[in-house]
Amino acid sequence: MSKKIVHIVGTGTIGEPLIGLLCDYKEQLGIDQITFHKNTPLKDDRSKVHSLLRRGARIAVNEDRIDGFKKLGIESDLSTEEAISRASVVIDCTPSGIGSQNKESFYKKFSNNVKGFIAQGSEDGFGMKYARGINDEVIKEKSDNQFIQVVSCNTHNISCITNTIAIKDVGPDNLKEGRFMCIRRANDTSQAGNFIAAPSVGSHDNETFGSHHAKDSYDLFSTLGYDLNMFSSAMKVNSQYMHVLWFYLKTKESITLNDVKDRLQNNDLVAMTSKNMTSTVFSFGRDHGHYGRILNQTVVVEQSLHVKNDHEVYGYCFTPQDGNSILSSISATEHFLYPHSFEDKVQCLSELFFDEI
């Protein structure tokens, strides 16, 4: 039986914690080896590379950069293309646009060797959109989808909130409209650039959906055959902690505040909180999450929930950033490795979910 090898391309905001989590749960997930590609030999990144190597991962680098890594004390005997060709699953976690370039330059070339390729939220058009807990049944039914795009962290949040409160168990026709405001952090705590000095509002580039968040969520639900009325706006604030989502859902069937709370509490991918600041939720994740990550799809502020006229639901929730994308990336990986039992395999991660934060 051939080895089950997962190869991660990129060691940034999603790639680094994903490599670590896969190493820590390798046996439970049924993975034989974790490899990763690092593009540039940087002294600032040496400590994290050594840490990932100590946790059991194996590094691959471009042949023309082997000497650069050697100067940093990092040895690699695995080339870029060799690492892709020998992998069972490849997860691309590179910056925006690079994943689609890699698909054309590398992934299509090795599509006969590799079971599946996964990219992140920025790579629109890479493959079928996917989020854990939303369209798992589609990736089970359409097993010939070799390329999968895990949607962005805010798209996870929008989709989870919409599905849990308005659609699950009652059907897509129950959602009359969904309106969302994504209040985004300026950059990640690991990023040195792109911070902003003051809040900055975004534009509505899509006539139907506003910002890309509602469009991406609509496309995700469309894999299930749903045609939803969704619109989103977005802005950035001068904070590094967490994204905040304001939501408004109008339902066809009447709903009470207790109904809303019950539906949210019954979804193990939803965490409830009475904390109303991103800093305190972020701090909880740092202290109690897996290396600071919260893997739930959303963290709902319980006291912000409100129901008006028996049909209109309002509330705020926090987006666990890379955590929810990491969960979906692992779920998609297990689908490629164990198509008939991936649901059972990913249950080993349930110990990392929180009911309350």
Image (spheres, helix red, strand yellow):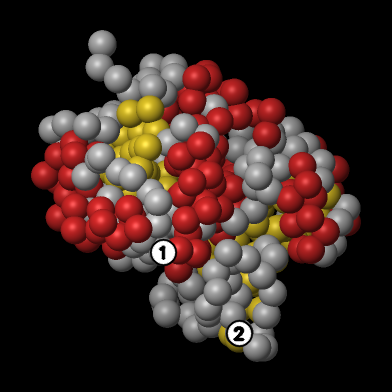
Mark 1 lies on residue: 42
Q: Is residue 203 above or below residue 279?
A: below
Q: Is residue 80 visible?
A: yes
- Residue type, label 1: Leu
Q: Nearer the viewer, residue 238 or 299?
A: 238
Task: Measuring from the top left, give residue 332's x and y in whole percent.
Answer: 41, 35
**Residue 225 picture quarter:** top left
**Residue 116 picture quarter:** top left
The secondary element bearing badge 1 is classed as loop
- For marks 2 and 1 on the same chain, the one whose residue lies earlier in the sequence: 1
The secondary element bearing badge 2 is classed as loop
**Residue 170 picture quarter:** top right
Instruction: Say which quadrant the N terminus sits in.
Output: top left
Q: Is residue 344 above or below residue 156?
A: above
Task: Measuring from the top left, give residue 60's x and y in whole percent.
Answer: 30, 45
Q: CA distance from mark 2 to mark 1?
A: 25 Å
Q: How many numbered circles does the render carry? A: 2
Q: Residue at x 75, y 38 (%)?
A: 354
Task: Measuring from the top left, give residue 335's x and y in whole percent.
Answer: 39, 28
Residue 196 tag number: 2
Q: Residue at x 41, y 64 (%)?
A: 42
Q: Nearer the viewer, mark 2 or mark 1?
A: 1
Q: Residue at x 42, y 28 (%)?
A: 334
Q: Nearer the viewer, residue 268 or 310?
A: 268
- Residue type, label 2: Ile
Task: Measuring from the top left, give residue 318's x and y in whole percent.
Answer: 70, 58
272 with respect to 116 (left or right): right
